[in-house]
Amino acid sequence: MDRTPGCGPGGWWFDSTRVRILEGSHSGQLHEFRKLDPFGGSQVRILYPPHHMKKLENYLKKNPKTHLIFDLDETIIKLVLPWDEWFVDVLGKIRQTYRDFPETEYVRIHNGLVEHYGEEGLALIRELNERFENEKLFRIERNEELIDFIKNNPNYTYYLWTSNSGKTAKRFLEELGLDQIFKKVVTRSDSTFIKPHTQGFDLLKDSKTSISDYLFVGDSSRDKEAAKALEMDFFLIDYFHGTF
């Protein structure tokens, strides 16, 4: 396994399965953490922009909510995957089965398969996507401040709504210690259509809760479009997009 540290949007990283935080502090414009590679004993400085979650906390003070819905990839964590290969591998295999399948855009590939081929198309895209996420994942990067926010604010009811596979979501929620926090989790494995289609919300919503009490926290235009279609407030997380 490659032991060389690299630089990601959140700072320097090691393979998350082999690294533990030794100490943390903050000063000036950066949070500083020191991590130890237990195999080699070397320490690496990890630098994170400070108080990123203050924006969310301030928003919630001004706009009180009781139910928070989170996206997973590039919101709570980032799955570092070769997405260009997704289109080659997944779309290539789809067209081996459905030679005239016309869609080429990520969301339309999933939702279009369901629209054109029903349950058979749904089963195929779920299988191919889960295999891709399982076999091609290089590493994950964590939004530590957001993870801490979720763990340390028990007065909210939490939900996860993701287009990742159920297997991927389960694995990383357990690794992050979040699996017992989310009241409901809706993944690609549960929902027939993926965001911005709003079906996923139908699977997690509490019928007694007003839409005004929900906040959708995500990173993408698909998340934002889903929230808009539901007339739900939306909060953008841009931690992994290089702007803070």
Image (cartoon, grey):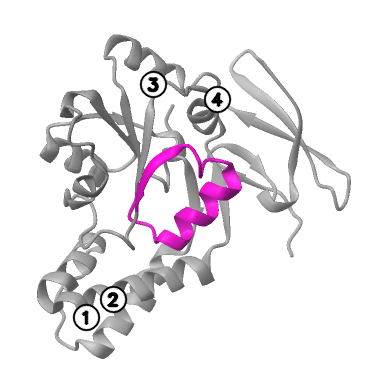
Q: Which residue is mark 2?
A: 123
Q: Which mark is residue 56?
A: 3
Of badges 2 and 4, the one in the foreground is 2
What's the distance in space between the residues labelled 3 and 1, CA to CA? 41 Å
Q: Which residues are magenta?
A: 162-186
Residue ID for mark 4: 49
Q: Is residue 204 left or right of residue 44?
A: left
Decide: is 179 above or below 33.
below
For label 2, the crowd category at 10 Å Cα-Cα, with few meaning under 14, some 14 to 19 and many 20 or more, is: some
Is disc 3 surrounded by few (<14), some (14 to 19) or many (20+) residues within 10 Å? some
User: At x 53% / y 51%, what residue is drawn?
Assistant: 172
Q: Is there CB contact under 8 Å for labels 1 and 2?
A: yes
- Measuring from the top left, give residue 141's x and y in whole percent: 56, 46
Quarter of the image for the C terminus: give it.
top left
Which secondary structure, mark 2? helix
Give x and y (percent) for residue 236. Answer: 32, 31
Q: Quadrant of residue 91?
A: bottom left
